[in-house]
Amino acid sequence: MRILVIGSGGREHAICSSFAKSAKVGKIFCAKGNAGIAEIAECVAIDPLDIPALTEFAKANTIDLTFVGGESSLALGIVDDFERHGLPIVGASRAAARLEASKSFAKDFMSEFGIPTADYKVAGSVSEAIDVLESGRFGGPAEPAVVKADGLAAGKGVVVAADRAEALRAVRELSSTVGEAAAETIVLEECIFGREVSLLAFCDGENYRLMPPVRDHKRLGDGDNGPNTGGMGTVADGALISDADLAVIERKIVVPTLEGCPKRGFPFKGILFIGLMMTARGAYVLEYNVRFGDPETQVILPLLQTDFADICDAVVRGTLSSTAIDWSDDAAACIVLASRGYPGKPQRGDIIYGTDLAVRRPSTTVFHAGTALDPRGHFVTDGGRVLGVTATGEDLAEALDRAYLAVNDISWNGMQFRHDIGR
């Protein structure tokens, strides 16, 4: 098989690595890729948002299967375009991608199909959002509230405000933070409390197969302090969700979601990501994503024991019901290493040392995200989140110990990371 992966982050490095393990895969291309991906795939200089160019590339290079990494390409309708040209592709349609591309659409969807989620109100302007907050519906003067940009914001469009004053400030600053397009509509929510966990599934339009539960750490600093980021680390561990809770989540959330999609005109094919809050009242949906998370992918795919190409083929063909998917019983942990200045203006061009040492450690992989090669062939920083150091172990404690030992092998000027992932 000839594979095209679309994207350039740590997620796409993990996806390319999984395809590379398959005996059925002969050639992997990645648009645009990064310095780490270039070691296992041919990187092509096509923007992931340039759908006509990607379509032409897939046709010209007889691509057997394309896998879309990021949400922006999906929201623009890349799957629809590829399918019109008869090109097999794994990803959500443009209509289905609205579950992620519009927070208000997703919340209305949940409400329509009785899927448990926090109470909410959609505001069509900053002034309307301010009126809602000042009415006291969400968050009193000293009570928390949640402010969300409606559109895509690279994981940074959500503010959990400690009180009304902070919520009002977040509303006023949202457009400057994530862009006017993303913040044209604002979703306000009650703040619910509990333990966050995410559940992903392969979906073929009718059937689904769940992946191991994962937990992401969004805040930049230890103790969940500092600004939100795209994710500073993840853990995958079966103990994150009990069997009893999982059965309820499937019955009340997963199945109603996938049954609701065709009722709204878009059978769901691709990767469904459900962000959950485990509360004293049960599981509530925080958000939908319509693709693998980053860095969730970096702990999920290392636990996969079934041929990834076979699973993707089943998603495209609609044969997941007859496809057995096996997972390791191990746990996995990923520690994200970020550039100085992240998540604001990350420093680029710093030489990265020690990745060769880290990958020699047991059950450890280093996934590249924001990296490039300098003229002398050194890996250098080329983005905010630079590397994801992933390790597996018989339990979460062992996986974390291995990951942090490997982190200690790596350095560059201004490298930052959290010391409490999974703790």
Image: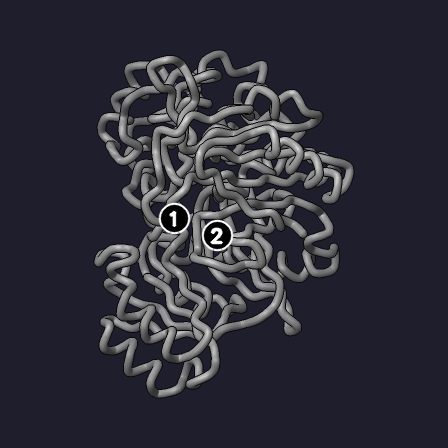
Amino acid on which the number 1 mark rests in the picture: Pro
Of the pair 366 and 95, the residue shown nearer to us: 366
**Residue 56, image quadrant:** top left
* Residue 309 picture location, percent across and down: 54, 24
- Name of the residue lying farthest toward the front: 413
Classify mark 2: helix, strand or loop.
Answer: strand
Give the residue number, with chain letter if any, for mark 2. 220
Q: Which of these two is toward me, 322 or 329?
A: 329
Camera sees residue 325: no
**Distance between mark 1 and mark 2 Cα atoms:** 8 Å
Q: Of 420 and 250, which appears nearest the observer? A: 420
Q: What residue is drawn where x is 46% and y is 83%?
A: 142
Height in image: 258 above or below 29? below
How far across and how far down the image is residue 193, in percent? 58, 71
In x, y percent, where is residue 319?
Answer: 56, 34
Mark 1, residue position: 343
Tell me the residue at 54%/19% (across/down).
20
Residue visible at 66% across and 34% down? 405
Q: From the viewer's perspective, is 93 left or right of 283? A: left
Q: Amino acid at mark 2?
A: Leu
Q: Quadrant for residue 378, please give it.
A: top left
Residue in front for this viewpoint, 130 or 61: 130
Which residue is depicted at the point 58% across and 14% down?
23
Tell me if I can see residue 121 in this picture: yes
Quarter location, residue 164? bottom left
Secondary structure under the numbered disc 1 in the rendered image: loop
Q: What is the crowding at mark 1: few (fewer than 14 residues within 10 Å), some, or many (at least 20)? A: some
Colour setting:
one colour
Q: Is residue 126 above or below residue 396?
A: below
Badge 1 vs badge 2, beta-carbon distance below 8 Å: yes
